[in-house]
Image (cartoon, coloured by chain):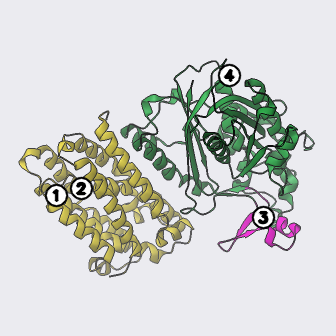
Amino acid sequence: MNNVYINGLGAFLPGNPVSNAEMEDYLGCVFGKPSKYRSASLKQNQIKTRHYALDKQGRSLHSSSGMAAAAVQAAMKNSEISLENIGYLATSATLGDSLVPGLAAHVHAALNIKEIEIANFQSVCASSLMAFKSAYAQLKAGEHNCAAVSGSEFASRHFRPGNYECVDAYKAVGEIPFQADFLRFTLSDGAGAAILETKPNARQLSLKVNWIDIRSYANRFDICMIGGAVKRNQDWNYWSGFGDPIAAAHAGALILIQDFDLMKRMLPVWVSHYLDLIDKGRIIIDEIDYVCSHYSSHGLREEIIVLLKQAGAMIDEDKWFTNLYTKGNTGAASIFIMLEELYHSGKLNKGEKILCHVPESGRCLNGFMLLEVV
Amino acid sequence: MSDPQVQAVMRGLIKVWMDFAVELDTVPLIDKLLRGKFRVEDYQKLLINHRQQVIEGSRWIARAASSVTSDYTDQRSLFLKHAVTEHRDYKMLEANYVSIGGKLEDILHAEKNIGTEALHAFMYQRATDPNPFDLLGAMFIIEGLGQKKAGEWGGLIKKQLSLKDEEVSFLLYHSANDEDHMRQFETILTSGILNIDGMDKKIVKTAKIVARLYRLQLEELGNV
């Protein structure tokens, strides 16, 4: 079996950083009023700046596939390969550009390279690790020698007022609920990508992929974050079953929402997965130099920290690396954007280990990836 | 707690706890509570079924203390102290039951449900073994419930049924007062009992059994 190395990382963040005060200039005001939950949402997620692929009139300046292709280009430029070396492309996103076909086809087209194998991963944030794992397995098995993996999101276009103002229930009260509005002030746009090869770089540091471990707990949880369905009398009604898309839109089946109480109840299984990896010897706490987690440490309650300390499983806060607060929560793109900044920070030394963590509330999933600087 | 053996036991216990915490949410009565559909009858049912568990709790701890040999007198003292702090808690529970319209004689004469029977049969059997320190696993689960879940449930019940603090005091009091118990737990765990051959694994296994039986007790409310 081949070893697999991340040999280049790239990011594409559209436009200039957007401050908290400017957010509604881009997202617009639903029902013509400033958001009621804006400050509560920002207090909770602590994000200070982010990027949007929209202009202030709400027009799309990019596409998810275009941003992904730009990130792959950037990753390629930072690596020692050329685009034509790529034999496999795995893309990830919460929502792609079209319903059909998958995002990977659009990214391949945007890259304008010869025929290659592609795979499309669509879930929520952890689709990034699914794409990583597929590329890792492909290279390990010797199917390809070089792969590109991307994560891209264009969330803001779904957060414009028109998406909400057609929902009958929201119209009736003249506002949108916290579970929809919170996401407007949490998710933003961007793309990140990695180039993977079966040999390390000759001239610069590589990140060897030691393992990737993903577990779904969908057997235990109801849907927590969903777009494309609405709950009526305890049953989920999918948007495609309303007879016509306009009826689905009126019913609110096209709105992205998240159930926060349910998300909080997922934390135990994520912690349990982590402890299990320690017991299996995959994670050795003393060996970890950096934690890149899509979940911020401030979201961990004190009692969990106490328990983790007692179990010898708490990784010191000064080892946590994140840029969620400055580059925004870009869903599936986040882990790439974090690794890209860490890699180019000049901080990394050979032998150091980076633990990547991407939980996903959609229907409860958790993923870890261990990288070693070589 | 830098001893790797202690840390491994803690990891095992936390994993069992975390799985248990998630599984509890699927128990019909708790699911109902989380859906915001709780009725006062549901709260009565919870209290009436819980009383036996609370009474038996301090009894099996006392039984366990009496099974501790003279090599472990410090640990025996801690077990005894723990039993004392809990042995009158059920009075508060009875008062809560009466305050929401339940009849005192109903709760006084309530029979254990089949889950409670199974749980306590297991506890007493273990408590009779010499030096039954694996019951620390049981304490971790039951104290965890008091410290984390009782407060959460108490808060939801209070809100959904528009109750006063004193009508939910048993659940609320437990979440506020069990922190000392966790400290005692740490003291015993690090006191040398892990030198007993196989005790580390036995503690985690007992936690697993108790978690399953505890859930059974909540699933079988009223089934006597």
Q: What residue type is labelled 2?
A: Leu
**Colour yellow belongs to chain:** B
The reply to whether discs 4 and 3 touch (Cβ–Cβ < 8 Å) is no
Amino acid at the residue labelled 1: Ala
Mark 1–mark 2 CB contact (< 8 Å): yes
Identify the subunit bearing mark 4: A
Badge 3 amino acid = Ala
The residue carrying mark 3 is: A253
Residue at image mark 2: B135
The residue closer to the viewer here, A188 or A373, is A373
Cα–Cα gap, marks 1 and 2: 8 Å
Between the residue at mark 4 and the residue at mark 1, the CA separation in whole angstroms equals 59 Å
Percent coordinates x, y for residue A313 in the rendering: 42, 38
Disc 4 and disc 2 in contact, CB within 8 angstroms: no
Q: Where is residue A340 in the image (x, y as percent from the top left)?
A: 69, 29
Disc 2, SS: helix
| Residue A49, position as x, y percentages in the image | 74, 33
Chain A image colour: green
- Residue named by callout 4: A344
The verdict on residue A352 being magenta is no
Task: Give residue B64's mark.
Answer: 1
